[in-house]
Image: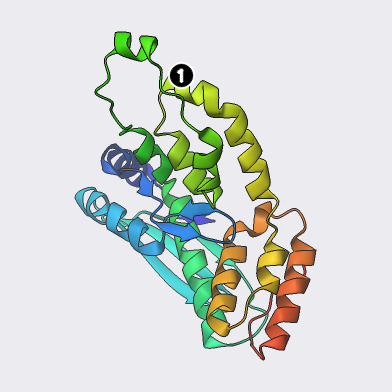
């Protein structure tokens, strides 16, 4: 990291920035790993006005095999950091994917941003019922939790359905949901890779793996399976085996 001799005014401006900036909404889906994330546009939209109001600006410059992110203040004070990521092949497609990934993570790091889980939004607006408490105690409605859980084909959709239940229903459905979550978790990335049949699906999988690279336990096996499939489809996409 590099910085100006003094950063006192920049730090004061950052405090004001954090008073205004909201959480980054996870508006994009990673279908291969059943997760959500905020794309680059959601980051830029959220930080634009708070940065301007506090005399701050972010400059991101691509360098050889990396990206330098510079946070500046109208006083002239600054801090900067550089992130490196070496694409396995020198193609515009692979370089573009790596650059977008670095820009998003560098912004989150230098501004210490927080991300909002879109499942939380669903949980904040639970479905309401018009049945009075006394009536429900006399004639409780027993839902078929197994049938309802089986309609969920991802862990994310399972969470959203579970959050629509009231506290009593959640207790009743907890065992069913736990078992269904285990079942959905058994679907491995390698199985998904083996089903890929075209370049578009391959690219989506490539970006998904980059998103979850640090959390994949068997990453080497996943990377090898991906590279094998890329060769079958005559694609230039390639993942490093480490």
Left/right of residue 136 with respect to residue 218 in the rendered view: left
Q: Colour scheme used in the picture?
A: rainbow
Decide: few, some or many residues near mark 1? Use Cα within 10 Å; few <14, some 14-19, many ≥20: few
Residue at left offset 26%, top offset 41% = 20
Left/right of residue 146 with respect to residue 62 in the rendered view: right
Pinpoint residue 121: horizontal percent, then vertical percent: 35, 40
Pinpoint residue 217: horizontal percent, then vertical percent: 75, 53
Total of numbered circles in the picture? 1
Q: Is residue 48 above or below residue 118?
A: below
Quadrant containing the N terminus in the rendered view: bottom right
Pinpoint residue 36: horizontal percent, then vertical percent: 48, 53
Residue at left offset 52%, top offset 74% = 97
Pinpoint residue 241: horizontal percent, then vertical percent: 77, 70
Q: Nearer the viewer, residue 212 or 76?
A: 212
Q: Nearer the viewer, residue 214 or 110?
A: 214
Q: Nearer the viewer, residue 218 or 148?
A: 148
Q: Is residue 96 above or below residue 125?
A: below
Residue tagged 1: 168
Q: Is residue 112 above or below residue 173?
A: below
Quadrant containing the C terminus in the rendered view: bottom right
Q: Can residue 117 be seen by looking at this rendering?
A: no
């Amino acid at each position: 990291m590099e910085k100006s001799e003094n950063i006192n005014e920049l730090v004061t401006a950052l405090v004001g920035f954090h008073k205004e900036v909201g959480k980054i909404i996870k508006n994009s889906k990673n279908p291969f790993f059943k997760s959500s994330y905020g794309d680059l546009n959601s980051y830029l939209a959220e930080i634009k006005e708070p940065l301007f109001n506090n005399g701050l600006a972010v400059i991101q410059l691509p360098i050889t095999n990396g990206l330098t992110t510079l946070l500046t203040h109208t006083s002239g004070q600054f801090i900067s950091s550089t992130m490196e990521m070496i694409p396995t092949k020198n193609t515009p497609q692979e370089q573009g994917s790596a650059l977008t990934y670095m820009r998003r993570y560098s912004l989150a790091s230098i501004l210490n941003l927080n991300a909002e889980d879109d499942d939380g939004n669903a949980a904040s607006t639970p479905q309401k019922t018009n049945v009075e408490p006394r009536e429900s105690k006399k004639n409780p409605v027993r839902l078929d939790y197994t049938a309802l859980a089986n309609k969920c084909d991802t862990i994310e959709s399972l969470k959203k359905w579970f959050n629509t239940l009231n506290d009593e229903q959640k207790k009743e459905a907890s065992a069913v949901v736990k078992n269904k979550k285990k079942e959905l978790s058994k679907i491995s990335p390698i199985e998904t890779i083996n089903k890929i049949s075209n370049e578009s699906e391959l690219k989506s999988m490539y970006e998904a793996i980059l998103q979850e690279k640090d959390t994949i336990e068997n990453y080497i096996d996943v990377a090898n399976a991906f590279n094998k499939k890329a060769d079958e489809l005559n694609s230039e996409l390639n993942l490093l085996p480490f």
